[in-house]
Structures are given as structure tokens and as C-alpha cells.
Amino acid sequence: MARLIILDIPSGVTFGIDAFSFTIGIKFRGVRLIPPGLHYCHYSVGGGDEQQSNGFGGRHGFFFAAREADDIIVWRWNNSLEDLEPGHRALSEGSLAALEVAWAILITFLKYSRTI
């Protein structure tokens, strides 16, 4: 199953994949066990803070395809833009290799589930 790695995203962001949505904490690093196919990742900044927009925030998102069982899709949070950017612009080749090595010890990934 594929893995979606989300780097440097701040806690409190509303994050979702397909029909699932949750407010993430400081240990969030991504989603694992994503089945093959086309998926939609969505997120909203500032919507959960009572002092900002009364619980309503703009939602952003992107589609991605999980083709192979060992796919690793990487996105990184850009603080200046307050947005996610694709990993190929955010990470060096060495960083991607290090992520693959460290994958076995990362336990802070949400498990993708088709059941509610």
C-alpha cells in the first residue's frame, strides 16, 4: 500500500484524504496503507481557531495517484505561503533516501481505512 508523507505541517490544521477528515496534532507525519487508485488530499488552515473566521476556513487540496504498493508521495508545508508543495520541489534526493530508510520507525502515520 502507498504512503503519503506530509512534512512540517503545523498542528491544528484540518487534514483529510478522500472522505476522511481530522484535525491533526504535532506528531502527524502522513497517511499509510493507501490503496491503489486516484485520491484527493484536502486541508484547511485556521478554520478551527475560535478567533479566526468562526470555524470556517478556505479548503485547499490536490489529487494524487497511488499506482504501486511501495509508492511514497511526499509533500512539504511552506510556512510563508501557508500551503503544501510537492516533495520534488521541497526535498533533495538524499532527503528522500533518508525518508525511505526511516520509514520503518515512523509510527505517527494515520492508517487509511475504508470503514467509518
Image: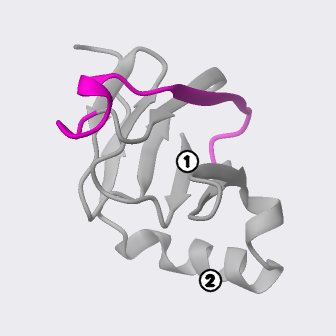
Residue range in magenta is: 48-70
Camera-side residue of 41 and 93: 41
**Distance between the alpha carbons at the discs numbered 2 and 1:** 15 Å
Q: Which mark is residue 110?
A: none
Camera-side residue of 61 and 45: 45
Residue 72 in the magenta stretch? The answer is: no
Say if 29 sits above or below 23 in the image: below
**2 or 1: tag closer to the N-terminus:** 1
Q: Which mark is residue 98?
A: 2
Residue 64 in the magenta stretch? The answer is: yes
Give the residue at the far left of this rendering. Answer: 50
Residue 55: give x, y in percent of width and height: 25, 25
Q: SS of the residue at dot 1?
A: strand
- Name which quarter of the figure residue 78 lies in: bottom right
Locate the N terminus by quadrant.
top right
**Residue that carries the numbered disc 1 in the rendered image:** 4
Say if 94 sits above or below 26 in the image: below
Q: SS of the residue at dot 2?
A: helix
The kind of residue on which mark 2 rests is: Ala
In the shown orientation, is residue 49 left or right of residue 82?
A: left
Say if 42 sits above or below 82 in the image: above
